[in-house]
Image: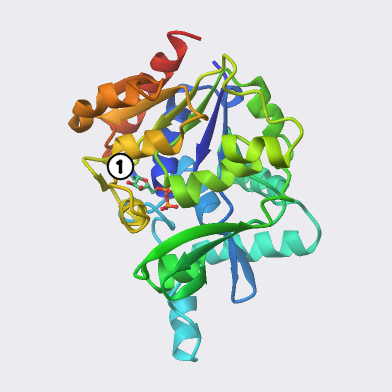
């Protein structure tokens, strides 16, 4: 069964890792958000892409979910002593990734090719692609003005109240090389339990998978949803996020955070929805949105949890495709 998974960082990477434990390399393509990419110290940093790559390479820090295991912090500590910025943590090993990526980008190589080459070097056999080789920048409109995503997310620790989002460059950004073909030939699309607002929406917009953008912007939206299952897994469990600001964003945007709110967010895009057992009382309401539902354990604490959730999702979408 050929699957395309759409992923942000930590939540997306965990499910992508579960899918990779089951599916053969040629059966899984993971398309990753790059709206939160930014330049720092002159280096091009792709936080979500690196999180997914490190996780599949089993190089990720299991405590944080981001960054690398066995990391040291000499370079950033030294830079900070010299008066440099230290709000974005860059480990020594991780820095090597950014140095080499920046060198290759400056030499003119596309991000998707660089990512393929890095994955090969790290022993990752499944395909991981950025959503686009062109720049898309997520901007967060807040009560303190508009902030670049990492400024809001890391520097300001998601404290400003959110009023909306803007994805600069998304109108012009083409899907990365190979990504459109992967979506077209997939048997099902899996939207990982990532932040709907800032991790998944940028990807959906690049691929014209949203009802709101498809007709206006691109002549031919990708043929998903017409018989092809598109399944989303709720990142909200029991009204809260496992990690990160998604629930806070829903509240600040005037929406009660819940699995139902997530299902509603993806209305018109998804055919199937997976939510946690603690939210089983929402099943009928989600079915009312014309989606098939699966209620299961969606909290991935261990590698086995990731594999079991991935297996349940594949069975769910495979059962009627
Ligand atoms: P980020 O870019 O690192 O913030 O990563 P993502 O957008 O991929 O992930 C953030 C979302 O993942 C949050 O809304 C979390 O609630 C969700 N998440 C993290 N771990 C899990 C998990 O084990 N299960 C589920 N269902 N959601 C999770």
Is 261 displayed left or right of 296 in the figure? right
**Relative to the observer, which residue lies in front, 299 or 191?**
191
| Residue depicted at x 44% and y 42% | 13
Quarter of the image where one finds residue 124: top right
- The x and y percentages for residue 296 are 26, 25
| Residue depicted at x 61% and y 21% | 186
Quarter of the image where one finds residue 196: top left
**Relative to the observer, which residue lies in front, 301 or 38?**
38
Count the labels in the image. Answer: 1
Q: Where is 271 relative to 180, above or below?
A: above
- The x and y percentages for residue 146 are 51, 71
- The x and y percentages for residue 184 are 67, 24
| Residue depicted at x 48% and y 40% | 56
Please, which residue is most extreme toward the top here?
Answer: 320
Please, which residue is most extreme toward the bottom here?
Answer: 82
- CA neighbours of label 1 inside 10 A, class few (<14), some (14 to 19), many (20+): many
Residue carrying label 1: 236
| Residue depicted at x 72% and y 49% | 173
Element at label 1: strand
Quadrant holding the N terminus? top right
Please, which residue is most extreme toward the right here?
Answer: 108
Is 46 displayed left or right of 309 in the figure? right
| Residue 130 in view, yes or no | no
Disc 1 under 8 Å from ligand 1? The reply is yes
**Relative to the observer, which residue lies in front, 108 or 123?**
108
| Residue 211 in view, yes or no | yes
**Relative to the observer, which residue lies in front, 7 or 99?**
7
Q: Where is 279 relative to 81, above or below?
A: above
- The x and y percentages for residue 118 are 63, 48
Is 113 displayed left or right of 243 in the figure? right
């Amino acid at each position: 069964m050929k699957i395309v998974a759409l992923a942000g960082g930590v939540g997306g990477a965990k499910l992508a890792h579960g899918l990779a434990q089951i599916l053969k390399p040629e059966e899984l393509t993971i398309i990753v958000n790059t709206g939160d990419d930014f330049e720092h110290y002159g280096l091009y940093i792709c936080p979500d892409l690196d999180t997914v790559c490190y996780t599949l390479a089993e190089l990720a820090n299991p405590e944080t979910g981001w960054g690398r295991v066995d990391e040291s912090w000499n370079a950033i500590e030294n830079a900070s002593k010299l008066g440099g910025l230290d709000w974005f943590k860059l480990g020594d090993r991780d820095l090597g990734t950014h140095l080499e990526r920046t060198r290759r980008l400056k030499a003119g190589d596309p991000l998707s090719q660089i990512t393929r080459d890095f994955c090969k070097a790290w022993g990752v056999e499944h395909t991981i692609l950025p959503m686009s080789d062109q720049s898309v920048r997520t901007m967060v409109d807040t009560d303190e003005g508009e902030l670049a995503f990492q400024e809001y997310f890391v520097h300001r620790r998601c404290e400003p109240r959110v009023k909306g989002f803007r994805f600069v460059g998304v109108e012009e950004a083409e899907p990365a090389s190979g990504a459109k073909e992967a979506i077209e030939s997939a048997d099902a699309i899996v939207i990982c339990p990532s932040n709907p607002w800032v991790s998944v929406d940028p990807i959906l917009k690049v691929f014209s998978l949203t009802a709101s953008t498809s007709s206006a912007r691109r002549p031919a939206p990708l043929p998903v949803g017409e018989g092809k299952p598109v399944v989303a897994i709720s990142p909200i469990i029991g009204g809260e996020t496992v990690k990160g600001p998604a629930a806070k964003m829903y509240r600040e945007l005037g929406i009660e955070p819940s699995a139902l709110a997530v299902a509603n967010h993806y209305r018109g895009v998804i055919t199937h929805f997976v939510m946690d057992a603690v939210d089983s009382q929402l099943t009928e309401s989600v079915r009312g949105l014309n989606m098939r539902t699966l209620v299961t354990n969606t909290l991935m604490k261990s590698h086995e949890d990731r594999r079991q959730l991935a297996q349940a999702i594949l069975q769910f979408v495979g059962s009627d495709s």
